[in-house]
Image: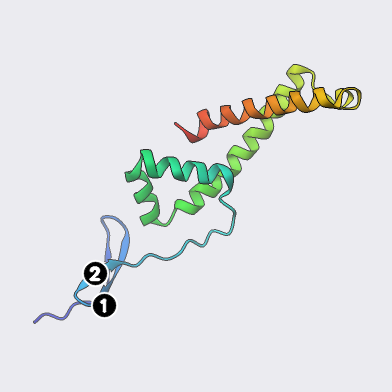
Amino acid sequence: MKELKERIHDNGNGLDYVLVGDYYIPDLKPPEESRPVGRWGRMYKAYLEEVHPGQYSALILSGKLWTYLADLNEQAQVRLEVIINQMKAAEGVTEDLKHRDWLGWVQAMNSIRSRAEEIICSEMIYL
C-alpha cells in the first residue's frame, strides 16, 4: 500500500492539508489579527454569513476574514466621523449651541449620528 504524505499543499486554493487518520483536513491557523473587529466588522460578518456565504467561506479558508473585518471597521469608523463633522457644519450644530441649548444640541447630535450610521450601513455594510 502506498504511504500517504503527512502534509500536502494544494496550489489550486492555496491551502495546506494535514493527514488525520485516512483523511486530509485543512490546516487552518487562527488569525494573527490583534485589531478589534468592532461594531461595523461584526455587522458585516453577519451580513456575509447570511447573504454571501461563498465569499464568507472563502475569507475564512484563506485566513483573511479577521483582517478584512478589522480593516472595514476602521474605514467605517473614519467615514462615520467625517460624515458627522460634515453634517454638524451644514446644520450649524456648534459648541456655542451646546452651551446655549444643550437639549437641542443633544437632539441634533442624535439625529446626525443616526443618519450618519444609516449612510455607513448603506454604503459599506449592506451592499
Instruction: Judge from the rendering whether residue 112 lies leftward or rightward of residue 66; answer left or right.
Output: right
Residue at 42 percent of width and 57 percent of height:
63
Q: Nearer the viewer, residue 115 or 9?
A: 115
Residue at the (32%, 61%) spot, across then down: 15
Residue 96 badge: none
> Looking at numbered disc 1 in the image, what kind of residue is underneath it?
Glu
Q: Are marks 1 and 2 in contact (CB under 8 Å)?
A: no
Q: Nearer the viewer, mark 1 or mark 2?
A: 2
Q: Earlier in the sequence, mark 1 or mark 2?
A: 1
Query: Relative to the observer, which residue lies in front, 113 or 86?
Result: 113
Q: Can you say whether 28 is above or below 49 in the image?
A: below
Which circle marks residue 24 in the picture? 2
**Looking at the picture, which amino acid does disc 2 mark?**
Tyr
Above or below: residue 92 compared with residue 22: above
- The image quadrant of residue 53 is top left
Image location (x, y in percent) of residue 110: 71, 28
Instruction: Identify the residue shown where x is 25% and y is 55%.
Output: 12
Would you place residue 29 above or below residue 109 in this image? below
Residue 65 at what x, y percent from top left?
Answer: 45, 51
Mark 2, secondary structure of its residue: strand
Q: Quadrant of the N terminus?
A: bottom left
**Horizontal placement of 107 versus 14: left or right?**
right
Q: Label 1 neighbourhood size at 10 Å, few (<14), some (14-19), many (20+)? A: few
Residue pointed to by mark 1:
6
List x then y, in percent, for residue 104.
Answer: 81, 22
Residue at 38% across, 64% down: 28
Q: Which residue sits furthest left?
A: 1
Q: Which quadrant would the C terminus be assigned to in this image?
A: top left
The image shows residue 54, relative to residue 110, as above or below, that is below
From mark 1 to mark 2, how far is it between C-alphas? 9 Å
Residue 68: x and y, percent? 49, 48
